[in-house]
Amino acid sequence: MMTNEISRLLKAEIGLDSKTVGMSHIEAAVQSRINRHASETLGHADYLELLKTSKDELRLLIEEIIVPETWFFRDPGAFRALGQIAQMQPQPLHPQGFRVLCVACSSGEEPYSAAMALLDAGLDETRFHIDAIDVSARALEKARLGVYGSNSFRGTDLGFRDRYFTRSPNGYRINGAARSSITFQWQNLFSLEPRGPGDAYDAVFCRNLLIYFDQDTKHQAIQSLATVLKDDGKLFVAPSETSLPLHAGFAPCSFPLAFASEKKPTPEPASACAKEPIRRRPAPGSRRLWKTVHRRPPGPATTGAPFPAPPGRQVPDPEPESYPGTEKPLERARECANRGDLDQAATLCREHLQNNAASTEAFHLMGLIHDSKGEMEEAVQAYRKALYLDPKHYDSLMHLSYLMRKRGDVKSADTLALRAKRLENATSTPTPNRAS
Ligand SMILES: C[S@@+](CC[C@H](N)C(=O)[O-])C[C@H]1O[C@@H](n2cnc3c(N)ncnc32)[C@H](O)[C@@H]1O
């Protein structure tokens, strides 16, 4: 009973849906906090009273509960896309230049990756700024320190470590250029103040946080993020969260496996996604960037997480399906798509389909690949096959709906969107209003 009340407090404070981390995790965190008080007289009921009156205690409990898991260049397609988007900016309107908000930045790996990607894209550190926020003071302290162990460096493409870090006895220390344009701040996603056109952000990252919310809270969160993003600004979410912005009227962007969408209710041909990039000074040592800018096909893929989410304890940090060196064609296909090698990704997808003719995920990925190459007809066919195999494949429904609308087939688009909406409603539970 008391844990239910604590769950309500946590939801009101940071949006957390306790089911996503598991009640036993919450109970253990509460017990740990009670033990820290080292008082024999502090029972569970007293602790609940303390939580209701002390914001400090609530924050300390939150520290015990949150999952700060993160690493550099997690889902690297997002950072490649960020670099391109910054290059596309015709002129920085704000004195700070290109502006990024990183919500739920945890211990800093994500905003530092964004900074490295922007430097790699040819912007110097005076031409961009990143505001990075989180509700964990502990994680922010680590972020400001900027010293990281091996767990923060995953995968095999670690060239950035040589270029942007200095080895120290305690780990790898991030260098000045990548750190000077980032401001870390304690802030709650739900206390973001709407921004006017002059100071709204060009890009917002909010990844691997929405998975901790129930359906209503996810939508509130997207609305809140939209208020700080400028029109045509880009919102980056995690692979399993891509449908949410689309449902809120964002338009998908064409960057493969970037999981980005654009704040624009009705996609128009002359959107920022379709503009020719204006190259700034060349990017010495930069990694491969896209050579062409694709014309607004829907882009994002899922990790293959079914919708609705699997029952039982939800693992809050879905691992990307693709890791370097893997032997499985579908995983290698994602890996190639992530690198921007769409032809090889398509070949591997077909290879996978030869042995797995009923692979919904392979058809969905084929749809994304065709989309990214501007092959609309092929993309439609691939999404249809995915939906034939799994009529409840939410992301295929959303992407196909988007393509149908783009083709002018509004009726089919509406029908598909309605099917997706029904799926979504079937998984959402009524929740009380948030006190934010
Ligand atoms: C799994 S980490 C995500 C880190 C990073 N975004 C990534 O994708 O690698 C989740 C982070 O969300 C933060 N968080 C939880 N609720 C929040 C809220 N309401 N506002 C801001 N940050 C929040 C936690 O403190 C934690 O650091």
Image: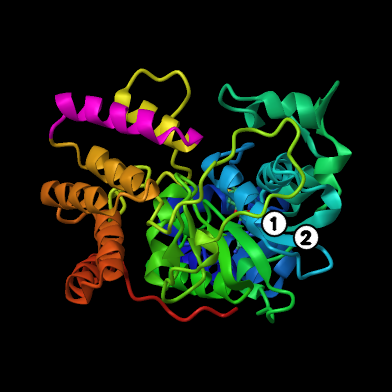
Question: What is the total number of numbered labels drawn onto the structure image?
Answer: 2
Say above or below: 220 vs 65. below
Q: Please identify the quarter of the rendering in which residue 151 is found.
A: top right
Whether residue 123 is visible here, answered yes or no, is yes
Q: Quadrant of the C terminus?
A: bottom right
Q: Nearer the viewer, residue 137 or 422?
A: 422
Residue 323: x percent and y percent? 46, 27
Ligand 1 lies in which image quarter? bottom right
x and y, in percent, of residue 377 in the image: 23, 53
- Which residue is disc 2 drawn over? 185
Depth order, front residue of 5/229: 229
The answer to if 354 sits in the magenta stretch is: yes
Image point (61%, 61%), residue name: 204
List the residue tagged with mark 1: 60
Bounds of the magenta segment:
339-357
- Name the residue rendered at 26%, 67% in the picture: 407
